[in-house]
Image: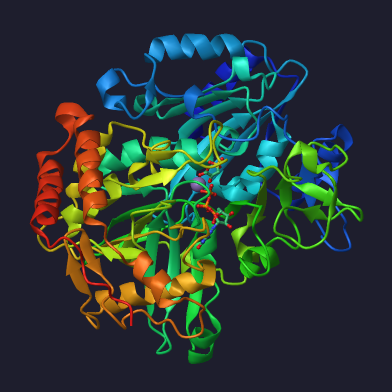
């Protein structure tokens, strides 16, 4: 073995000594290897074959019912100094954390196969890409990592060239929630995850590496690792603007990344290109603009609600060669979830479907599919230099108060807007659903260090000569008095993106308000949708009293991060609060 791989070999040897597997397999990422894994999982019941006529190459995996989402209360950032992890993370001293989890790993792979998965996050030739190696005893994890990352021989070759990689050790253990931890050691570029086989807990290249560890690396190296989709919007002239958007888990990233333009837009020649649906790594280029890559190679998307009307691109992507996790099944063995036509006969736990047991598909059921199968997959997604960003968008589930869209007045205000983000919790993590919480930049569960330092790092990009993207905030989830969403959402979100791009190009004025710039009357293209002027008024309304209370709450939240909170951000909160206090009691309605 070549010298640069010695560190890898040494680590594998250590893990073998600790976990004592019966077999060791180095993954090469080949088709033959994948076929063999699938055959083996069909035999063990880890995978169930779906209807191969309607869904060739598609399989179903049923998780242990106690293991169906990320576990934020069992996820730790283990830095030498507790302050470096910040109040936004659970912390454990590195030595204690290693001791605690190594005890669980002791002998845990007896009788099992240990898989060594070399992977690359980002296009193999990209200077922005980073490599890792995951060791796991789960063939399901291997199969998913093969789709979600550039896994195998090419990644190993890059690791051999560079000599550095993130170490991720994973075992499903007993799948016992009492014996489950997801631990991060950013100073050691190491992850240890025990006791879960699910998504973000187990596919260590995704949230653990590409967000928690990468955000830490990005801070010292001058870039950003973010929980954002990346989408290209091509106008009828053939010009494409790239937009990155941070929405919390299960709040619409995959949907916006794969958006289908409304009828009138399609006729005019608008096109949408998918670059990424969950994670964005970005850094300033030589021209001062921010360039973004998607470190992933596949989609691990929310199944429920994915339909021909909401997201036809996703539906087309998952017609073949897809692993479904925790969905229901129809009488003729097709995958099924709430939002699809037809009826389920078997629920996500394999029981005969009974509505009394709740939804047929688990609300956090998912599909794993190669990004190449997406009809709108952007050719630029493989570009080693990434795509230049015109806009950054923040947004969450806000049933009230927050308007459909507003623009931050500058970068520092944009950092405040992202930092102040709030959203209702969803089924993507265990715990209560529908509870409003602050989720700065949609990174609450994923920022690998102190939020105060993180905001400071964001502010630091505002340098002389920087040509930074404009920052916006959106809310697709505002509800009317009847409890229904006011905005049609999905494809119609392009109407809002078009306005943002018009702002970027300086083609519309907007209307300045204390919280930011909103579309002025007539600036949102609304032909062909059923939206009455009362609904539009409500969507663009600014409730002064409500916003004053919101700014107070934001101030309190920022102060909760103590002395590491940049003064610049506190000043920005004060500026907006003062502007609100000075404003007229009620902003004029803008509807036509
Ligand atoms: P993660 O993969 O967990 O990070 O989620 P995500 O942000 O990619 O969310 P996704 O696009 O899968 O959407 C999650 C849920 O939000 C689905 O049930 C969608 O139907 C719903 N959703 C997405 N976009 C919209 C929208 O514009 N309006 C409304 N009302 N719902 C939406
Ligand atoms: C999320 O929860 O934000 C996801 C799914 O994208 S997971 O991979 O489980 O993190
Ligand atoms: Mn996500």
Where on the picture, by quarter, is residue 429?
top right
Q: Is residue 455 left or right of residue 311?
A: left
Residue 50 at x, y percent in the picture: 85, 51
Q: Which coloring applies here? A: rainbow
Where on the picture, by quarter, is residue 370?
bottom right
Where on the picture, by quarter, is residue 67?
top right
Q: Is residue 153 left or right of residue 219?
A: right
Residue at the image position 89 percent from the left and 63 percent from the top: 53
Q: Is residue 290 left or right of residue 114?
A: left
Observer-nearest of 161 and 390: 390
Q: How many marks?
A: 0
Compared with residue 363, is residue 484 higher up or lower down, i.e. above or below? below
Residue at the image position 33 percent from the left and 36 percent from the top: 216
Compared with residue 427, is residue 302 higher up or lower down, i.e. above or below? below
The reply to whether residue 145 is in sight is yes
Compared with residue 377, is residue 118 higher up or lower down, i.e. above or below? above
The reply to whether residue 374 is in sight is no
Image quarter in which the C terminus is found: bottom left
Residue 380 at x, y percent in the picture: 46, 69
Ligand 1 occupies quarter: bottom right
Observer-nearest of 564 and 102: 564
Residue at the image position 63 percent from the left and 35 percent from the top: 198
Image quarter in which the N terminus is found: top right
Looking at the image, which residue sits at the far right?
332
Q: Is residue 229 left or right of residue 515?
A: right
Residue 346 at x, y percent in the picture: 85, 44
Residue 270 at x, y percent in the picture: 47, 83
């Amino acid at each position: 073995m070549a010298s640069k791989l010695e560190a890898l070999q040494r680590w594998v040897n250590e893990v073998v000594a600790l976990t004592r597997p019966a077999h060791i397999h180095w993954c090469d990422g080949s088709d033959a290897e994948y076929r063999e894994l699938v055959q083996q999982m069909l035999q063990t019941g880890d995978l169930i074959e779906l209807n191969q006529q309607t869904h060739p190459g598609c399989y179903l995996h049923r998780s242990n019912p106690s293991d169906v989402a990320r576990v934020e209360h069992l996820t730790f950032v283990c830095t030498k100094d507790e302050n470096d992890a910040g109040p936004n993370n659970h912390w454990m001293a590195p030595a204690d954390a290693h001791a605690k989890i190594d005890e669980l790993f002791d002998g845990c792979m007896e009788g099992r196969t240990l898989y060594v998965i070399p992977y690359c996050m980002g296009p193999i030739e990209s200077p922005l890409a980073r490599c890792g190696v995951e060791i796991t005893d789960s063939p399901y994890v291997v199969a998913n990592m093969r789709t979600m990352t550039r896994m195998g021989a090419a990644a190993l070759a890059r690791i051999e060239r560079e000599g550095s990689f993130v170490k991720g050790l994973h075992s499903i253990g007993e799948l016992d929630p009492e014996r489950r931890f997801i631990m991060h050691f950013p100073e050691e570029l190491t992850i240890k995850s025990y006791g879960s086989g699910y998504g973000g807990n187990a596919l260590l290249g995704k949230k653990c590496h590409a967000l928690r560890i990468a955000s830490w690396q990005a801070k010292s190296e001058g870039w950003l690792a973010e929980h954002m989709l990346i989408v290209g919007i091509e106008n009828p002239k053939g010009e494409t603007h790239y937009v990155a958007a941070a929405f919390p888990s299960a709040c619409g990233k995959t949907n916006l990344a794969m958006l289908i333009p409304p009828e009138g837009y399609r006729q005019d020649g608008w096109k949408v290109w998918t670059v990424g649906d969950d994670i964005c790594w970005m850094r300033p280029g030589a021209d001062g603009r921010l360039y973004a890559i998607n470190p992933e190679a596949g989609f691990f998307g929310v199944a429920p609600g994915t339909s021909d009307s909401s997201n036809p691109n996703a539906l087309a992507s998952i017609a073949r060669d897809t692993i479904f996790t925790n969905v229901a099944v129809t009488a003729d063995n097709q995958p099924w979830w709430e939002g699809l036509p037809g009826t389920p006969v078997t629920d996500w736990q394999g029981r005969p479907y009974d509505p009394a047991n709740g939804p047929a598909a688990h609300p956090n059921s998912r599909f794993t599919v190669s990004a190449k199968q997406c009809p709108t997959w952007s050719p630029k997604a493989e570009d080693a230099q990434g795509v230049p960003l015109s806009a950054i968008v923040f947004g969450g589930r806000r049933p009230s108060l927050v308007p459909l869209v507003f623009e931050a007045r500058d970068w520092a205000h944009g950092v405040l807007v992202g930092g102040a983000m709030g959203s209702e919790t969803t089924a993507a993590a265990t715990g209560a659903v529908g509870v409003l919480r602050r989720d700065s930049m949609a990174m609450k569960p994923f920022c690998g260090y102190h939020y105060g330092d993180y905001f400071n790092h964001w502010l630091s990009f505002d340098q002389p000569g920087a040509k930074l993207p404009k920052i916006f905030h959106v809310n697709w989830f505002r509800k009317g008095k009847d409890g229904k969403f006011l905005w049609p959402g999905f494809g119609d979100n392009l109407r809002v993106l078009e306005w943002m791009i018009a702002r970027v190009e300086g083609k519309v004025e907007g209307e300045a308000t204390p919280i930011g710039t909103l579309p002025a009357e007539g600036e949102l293209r609304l032909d062909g949708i059923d939206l009455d002027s009362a609904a539009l008024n409500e969507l663009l309304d600014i409730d002064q009293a409500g916003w004053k209370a919101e700014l107070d709450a934001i101030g309190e939240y920022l102060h909760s991060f103590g002395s590491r909170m940049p003064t610049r951000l506190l000043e920005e909160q004060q500026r907006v609060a003062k502007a609100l206090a000075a404003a007229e009691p009620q902003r004029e309605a803008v509807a036509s």
